[in-house]
Image: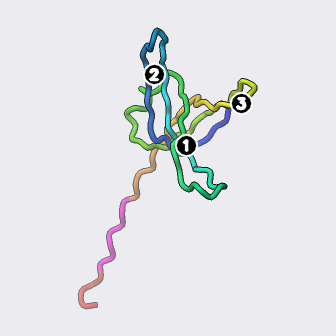
Amino acid sequence: MQFNTRMKVMGAKFFNDVVEGTKYDNTKVFVETPMNEQGGNAVGFAAAEYQWGTSENFQKIKSLPFPFEADCVLEMTTNGKQTKTILISITPVARAASPVAAPAAVKPQGQ
């Protein structure tokens, strides 16, 4: 099952190497995720980790200014016992230009 959501991408890392004869090539993306506040012992946000394909995906976002907002496609999969959510695609959302600050009001002298 695939679904779309907007997320704040906090960081990313990749690994592309051979370890003890096994080839590994992946990218992990870290996104801002709210803490579960229902138990009363947590507040705020943490970074959740999602798998995002090979190290080629890291190259697509490494030069972006972090953190950034992105429209993402995720997919939930299961092996019958456990559910896993993987990241399918990231489309960075263009940042709105910062509004120019209005000059401070100037009072006429003598008032």
93 or 31, nearer to the observer: 31
In the rendered image, which residue does mark 2 sit on?
Answer: 56
Label 3 – label 1 distance at C-alpha: 18 Å
Label 2 – label 3 distance at C-alpha: 24 Å
Instruction: Please give the label number shown on residue 7.
Output: 1
Image x and y of residue 96, in percent: 45, 50
**What amino acid does circle 3 point to?**
Met
Q: Please, is residue 31 above or below residue 41 in the view?
A: above
Secondary element type, mark 3: loop
- Badge 1: few (under 14), some or many (20 or more) residues near its Cα, within 10 Å? some
Name the side, left or right, on which 31 lies relative to 67: right
106 or 31, nearer to the observer: 31
In the rendered image, which residue does mark 3 sit on?
Answer: 1
**What amino acid does circle 1 point to?**
Met
Image x and y of residue 78, in percent: 71, 27
Label located before the other in sequence (3 or 1): 3
